[in-house]
Amino acid sequence: MWRSGRDHYGLVAIGFHWSIAIAFVGLVGLGAWMVGLTYYDPWYNDSLALHKAIGIAVLALALAKLGWKLIDRKPGYGPEVRAYERAGATATHWILGALLIVLPVTGYLISTSEGAGIDVFGLFEVPAFFDVSGGTRDLAIDLHYYLAYGGIALVGIHAIAALKHTFIDKGSTLIRMLIPRPRSSPVDRSVK
Ligand code: HEM
C-alpha cells in the first residue's frame, strides 16, 4: 500500500508525484501572472510571497521524494512500453527531478540576494545563506525563467506520453500512478 511494488506505485510515491505536479504547474501559472502585475495591484506583494512559500515547499517535497526513491522499489515498465520510450521516460524523470531542485534554488538565490530571508506561510523563515551579487543574480533570474518554461514544456511531453501509453497502447501507465495496488496487467520483469 505505502511502498511501491513490482508492478505498481505505492501511496507515498503517488502522493509525491501528484502534489509536486500540481504545485509545479500552479507555480508556473502563478509566476507568469505575478511578473505582469504592477506595483499598485493588490496582489503585487502577496502573489510573490505565495510563490516563494510554495516554491520552498516544492523544494522540500522534491528532496523528500528523492530520499524516498532511494529506498522505495521501482516498478517495471509494462510490455507495451518500447525500449526507446523507456530510455526517454527514464531521462525525462531524472531531468525533471534535477529541475525540481535547481529551479527553486535559483528562485531562492534571486529572492535572498538582498539579504532578506523567505517567509514560508508564516510558519518559519529560510534565512539568506549566500551573498549573491549583480552578475550571479542576473544568471539566477535567467536560469529561473528558462528552467521554469522549459520544465513546463517537459511536463507537457511527459503527460502526453503517459496519455498515449494509456489510451493508444492500452497500457497501465496512468492508472498505476493513480491507484496504489497491484494490477493484473503483465509486466516486463527484465526491467528494473
Ligand atoms: C518549482 C518551483 C518553481 C517554479 C516552477 C517557478 C516558476 C516561476 C515562473 C514561471 C516565474 C515567472 C518568470 C517570468 O516570466 O519572468 C517565476 C518568477 C519568480 N520566482 Fe519562481 N518558481 C519556482 C520556485 C521559486 C522559489 C522557491 C522562489 C523563491 C524562494 C521563487 C522566486 C521567484 C521570483 C523572485 C520570481 C520573479 C523573477 C523576476 O523578477 O524576474 N521561485 N517563477
Image (cartoon, rainbow, N blue to C red):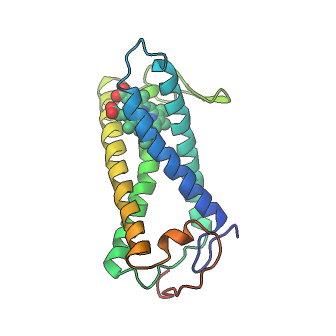
- Above or below 171: residue 24: above
Q: Does residue 174 appear anywhere in the picture?
A: yes
Q: Quadrant of residue 144?
A: top left
Position of residue 39 measured from the top left corner of the image (x, y, whole percent): 40, 13
Q: Position of residue 88 (x, y in %)?
A: 34, 69
Of all residues, the one furthest to the front in this rendering is 167
Q: Count all numbered tags in the image, as a single digit.
A: 0
Tell me which residue sits at (51%, 38%) in the image: 55
Answer with the quadrant where ligand 1 appears in the image: top left
Residue drawn at point x = 52 percent, y = 26 percent: 49
Depth check, front residue: 36 or 141: 36
Q: Position of residue 22 (x, y in %)?
A: 51, 48
Rendered location of residue 34, percent (x, y):
41, 27
Is 15 placed above or below 2 here? above
Q: Residue furthest top?
A: 40
Can residue 104 be seen in the rendering of this structure?
Answer: no
Residue at far right of view: 1
**In front: 144, or 49?**
49
